[in-house]
Image (cartoon, rainbow, N blue to C red):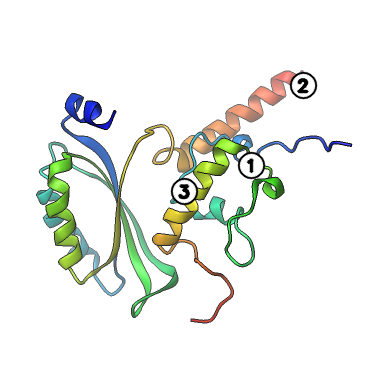
Amino acid sequence: MRRPKKPCPITEAGIRFVDYKDDRLLARFISDYGKILPSRLSGVDARHQRQLAKAVKKARFLALLPYVKGQQG
Amino acid sequence: MATLKTRMAPTRPYEIVYIFDSALEDATIAEKLEKFHTLLELAEPAEIEHWGRRQLAYKIGRHEAGNYVIANVKAGPATLPEFERALKLDDSVVRYMVSLIERVLGAPKLSDEELAARAAAADDDDDEDDE
């Protein structure tokens, strides 16, 4: 049995290209430890997942997102 | 592809994110921005967005907070090395990132109003479909 396909949350938000400065948006797609969620969990389509991965990495460099969450120091 | 683009347009759109020392005053930051931007030899003034003081997601050296400034500029690629050198030498710049804006529609302008407008438009479409 195949599950019905989840709609892509980024497409639904009307986003053409993922903005690395939008840390609120990006935070929805990282795990409790700060890892990028796989698209099979988040339902993001392939194109946006690629954009998302790059955006998260840029946001991490700019200290908008942590590299590792829930760690001291 | 890249060379072709450069040949066609001597300047390219860049987005520069600066993270300044949070202890710096706004006037000092404005002064520094001006100094840096003169190195880029801009034809038109930079579009500058101040985010203000923000907590960093992790410590960078001794810094726990930073003053974020985002600048959109059209600059020639040849001016960048000297510009970046100045940024690296300046101790008040905690971190910076220069990125080429490849998709004008995407990253820079979509964040706030356009997004809301798009969302509203999508909602309107849905409503029409229902009726």
Chain to which mark 1 belongs: A
Q: Which residue is mark 2?
A: B130
Q: Where is residue B23 drawn, in percent x and y? A: 28, 75
Q: Is residue B8 left or right of residue B64?
A: left
Question: Closest to the observer: A49 or B62?
Answer: A49
Q: Chain of mark 3?
A: A
The circle on residue A15 is none
Instruction: For label 2, count other residues whose C-alpha is less than 10 Å away and answer few (under 14), some (14-19) or many (20+).
Output: few
Give the chain of mark 2: B
Q: Which residue is mark 1?
A: A44
Amino acid at circle 1:
Val
Dot 3: element: helix
What's the residue type where badge 3 is placed? Lys
Q: CA distance from mark 3 to mark 1?
A: 14 Å
Left or right of residue B131, residue A60 in this image: left
Q: Are marks 1 and 2 in contact (CB under 8 Å)?
A: no
Q: Quadrant of residue A3?
A: top right
Note whether A50 is above or below A36 in the view shown.
above
Kindly indicate the quadrant of the structure image that contains residue B22. bottom left
For residue A54, the mark is 3
